[in-house]
């Protein structure tokens, strides 16, 4: 140990001796340093151009299925082997081995799910380290610090370019570029900090602290302060807690940095980088104004309170300045302020809220499904709409033109089957895709995880587009609620209509229109609106037995006749409704995939109960609402991989065509598929997810390790 310690100290000493401050400088030395600094600045510019060129190329390869790394599946086989070792350790009474394997699985999952972030960090750190520490005149720290400053300035145009909306890069959604923007920007800030620290060391060594207060360096201090303010407020906890402050800092200090750096960088100017920075930031403002429409009337926006969590918004199609050519596009909306100065401020610092359009461009009205948040929606108020912005759907090819009428027939879907897994208000992303898939006759299964069963009411706006067989809805919250809505307890209750008016509007409205989503609150309630994944590909014998023993009664009482005594008539049997309800309520959400039928615990005649009952009956969802979280396992894989549309849920005995109680697994079409019925190419099956980050990550893990193509509509910075 002593030898190792001495060896490490020697290495540190060698590195310390290598890096040094110069004792003096000559004119030749300064010119040589400037040439080398410019050389590596140009190399950095070429590298960033190469990265920007590679992004659309990679997206094109992904859309064609030619990206090799998307086909590599490692965690599935690893998980199966570790599970076998864990099982062996339990039988052999070796708990340490089991705990070790469990820890390895957890680490492997985290590495896989965070691989994109780790790649970004490794890529940019490697590039900057190589460029900063190559050809530095035998460890001259002034060479290093000049190089660091130059690299940071040259990389700034790329940092700003990655935030353009929409992105000028082909086949690229601007939201997908935000992680690259984040990590490149953080490395740039790190370069600026190290650049400053090295210079402070030089001032100390040469006793020249007065130089720190020179006018040119004051501009540098201002830029450094701006970098640090952006960095601190962009950290996850600070951003989530003070989001408006984060936005203000981001845009304000970006302009300050861009305007200050030209006066700080010397003696070699960076004119082209400075011009690019100003042009990009100015183009952001211009493009925002170009793609923005203001509601001409305060009655253009119709806001309806659907549930304590969900609101419905409808506005006319003319407010969409840039028509989408694909389903699942989104807009950015903010309120229209009567003060001109405030409106100008919102254009410079655009704290707009993104919402997914669940309607299609051909609809007369555009609609949103919004999770209630701090942004208030008020009837009788004008709003500003920016967009729309098309999603990057690799499975959909569109021949639509934004300047002509949109047509579903001009959408080509390259998929045999599609499994859509969404949570909460992300249902708005699934609905337009579902509409397109039904038009093209592509089998689809939508798994919707919600916390409050009352959110199901929003689906009534899609009557005519929804088929009950397409849906499996999982309710993770309690089946019991207080009678009626307590508006005083609702978040932002003053922003919405009452539940009674919403209910009446739903009853009397034209349901041939569409609705949409608010993705900005996806991170809340992640554990509630989530899924469980199982990478094993074998059927559990206990699961098979539970299929027909878990519930003595499966059919929802809403599809049966209720007599005056509160009894439910099923075939020739009479079952007390209260008994059925209590039998279901005694069991909480289970970890396996055989979920119970969800039945709300409400007194007969309760307004909310009656409304829920009419909703599920009207949309034919009686047998497709379950209690707890779904478990993605072999059942869903079988649905994806088999040629026929077998069910994925089995909740006990059900009525067959002769009104006899039979095991749900014995219904026609619910048999296991043989090898001859397998699809010839499983990679033609797509899995789509949207919603809370934990749900998206779990679905991504399951789809990837089962060899299914995957698309996520979730963008987290």
Image (cartoon, helix red, strand yellow):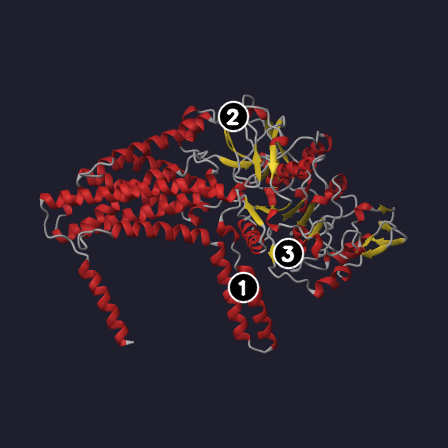
**Cα distance in 3D space between marks 3 and 2:** 41 Å
Residue bearing mark 1 = 78
Residue 308 seen from this side: yes
Residue 631 disc label: 3
Position of the C terminus, as image quadrant, is top left
Residue 475 seen from this side: no
Q: Are marks 3 and 2 in contact (CB under 8 Å)?
A: no
- Point out residue 658 in the picture as x, y percentages from the top left corner: 88, 50
Q: In this rendering, which labeled residue sits more in front, label 3 or label 1?
A: 1
**Cα distance in 3D space between marks 3 and 1:** 20 Å
Residue bearing mark 2 = 321
Q: Which residue sits at x=90%, y=53%?
A: 572
Element under label 3?
strand
- Point out residue 94 in the picture as x, y percentages from the top left corner: 55, 77
Q: Which residue sits at x=80%, y=49%?
A: 557
Element under label 2?
loop
Going from N to C along the chain, the mark reached first, 3 or 2, is: 2
Element under label 1?
helix
The answer to whether 691 is drawn above or below residue 273 in the figure is: below
**Cα distance in 3D space between marks 1 and 2:** 49 Å
- Point out residue 542 in the picture as x, y percentages from the top left corner: 71, 65
Q: Which residue sits at x=26%, y=42%?
A: 41
């Amino acid at each position: 140990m002593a030898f190792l310690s001495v060896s490490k100290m020697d290495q540190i000493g060698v590195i310390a001796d290598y890096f040094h401050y110069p004792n003096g400088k000559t004119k030749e030395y300064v010119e040589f340093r400037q040439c080398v600094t410019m050389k590596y600045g140009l190399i950095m510019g070429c590298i960033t151009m190469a990265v920007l060129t590679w992004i659309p190329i990679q997206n094109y390869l992904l859309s064609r299925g030619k990206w090799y790394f998307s086909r590599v599946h490692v965690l599935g086989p690893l998980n199966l082997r570790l599970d076998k070792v864990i099982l062996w350790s339990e039988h052999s009474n070796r708990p340490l081995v089991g705990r070790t394997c469990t820890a390895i699985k957890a680490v492997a999952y985290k590495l896989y799910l965070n691989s994109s972030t780790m790649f970004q960090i490794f890529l940019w750190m490697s590039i900057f380290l190589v460029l900063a520490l190559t050809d530095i005149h035998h460890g001259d720290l002034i060479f290093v610090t000049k190089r660091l400053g130059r690299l940071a300035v040259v990389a700034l145009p790329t940092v700003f370019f990655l935030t353009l909306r929409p992105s000028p890069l082909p086949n690229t959604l601007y939201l997908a570029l935000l992680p690259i923007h984040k990590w490149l920007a953080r490395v740039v800030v790190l370069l600026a900090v190290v650049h400053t620290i090295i210079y402070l060391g030089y001032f100390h060594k040469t006793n020249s602290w007065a130089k720190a207060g020179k006018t040119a360096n004051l501009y540098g201090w201002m830029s450094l302060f701006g970098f640090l303010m952006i960095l601190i407020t962009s950290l996850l906890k600070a951003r989530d807690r003070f989001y408006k402050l984060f936005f203000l800092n981001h845009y304000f200090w970006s302009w300050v940095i861009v305007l200050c750096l030209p006066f700080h960088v010397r003696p070699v100017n960076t004119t082209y980088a400075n011009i690019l920075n100003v042009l990009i930031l100015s183009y952001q403002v211009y493009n925002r104004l170009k793609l923005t429409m203001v509601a001409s009337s305060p009655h253009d926006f119709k806001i309806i309170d659907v549930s304590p969590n969900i609101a419905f918004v409808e506005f006319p199609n003319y407010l969409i300045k840039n028509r989408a050519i694909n389903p699942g596009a989104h807009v950015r909306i903010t309120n229209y302020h009567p003060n001109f100065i405030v409106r100008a401020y919102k254009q410079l610092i655009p704290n707009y809220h993104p919402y997914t359009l669940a309607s299609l461009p051909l609809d007369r009205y555009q609609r949103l499904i919004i999770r209630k948040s701090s942004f208030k929606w008020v009837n009788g108020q004008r709003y500003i709409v920016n967009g729309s912005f098309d999603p990057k759907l690799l499975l959909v090819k569109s021949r639509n033109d934004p300047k002509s009428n949109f047509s579903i027939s001009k959408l080509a879907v390259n998929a045999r089957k599609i499994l859509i897994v969404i949570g909460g208000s992300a249902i708005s992303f699934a609905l337009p895709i579902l509409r397109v898939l039904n038009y093209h006759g592509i089998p689809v299964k939508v798994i919707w995880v919600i916390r409050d069963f009352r959110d199901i009411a929003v689906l009534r706006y899609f009557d005519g587009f929804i088929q009950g067989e397409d849906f499996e809805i999982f309710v993770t919250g309690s089946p019991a609620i207080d009678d009626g809505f307590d508006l005083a307890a609702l978040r932002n209750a003053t922003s919405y209509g009452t539940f009674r008016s919403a209910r009446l509007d739903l009853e009397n409205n034209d349901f041939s229109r569409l609705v949409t989503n608010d993705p900005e609150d996806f991170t809340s309630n992640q554990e509630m609106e989530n899924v469980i994944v199982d990478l094993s590909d074998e059927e559990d014998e206990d699961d098979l037995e539970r299929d027909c023993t878990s519930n003595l009664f499966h059919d929802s009482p809403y599809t049966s006749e209720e007599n005056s005594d509160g009894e439910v008539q099923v075939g020739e049997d009479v079952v007390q409704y209260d008994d059925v309800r209590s039998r279901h309520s005694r069991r909480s959400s289970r970890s396996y995939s055989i979920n119970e039928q969800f039945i709300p615990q409400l007194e007969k005649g309760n307004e909310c109960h009656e409304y829920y009952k009419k909703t599920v009956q009207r949309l034919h969802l009686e047998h497709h609402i379950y209690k707890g979280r779904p478990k993605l396992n072999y059942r869903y894989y079988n649905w994806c991989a088999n040629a026929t549309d077998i069910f994925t849920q089995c909740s006990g005995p059900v009525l067959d065509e002769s009104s006899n109680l039979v095991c749900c697994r014995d219904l026609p079409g619910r048999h296991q598929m043989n090898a001859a019925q397998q699809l010839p190419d499983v990679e033609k099956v797509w899995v789509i997810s949207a919603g809370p980050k934990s749900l998206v990550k779990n679905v991504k893990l399951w789809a990837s390790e089962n060899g299914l193509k995957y698309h996520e509509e979730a963008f987290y910075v």
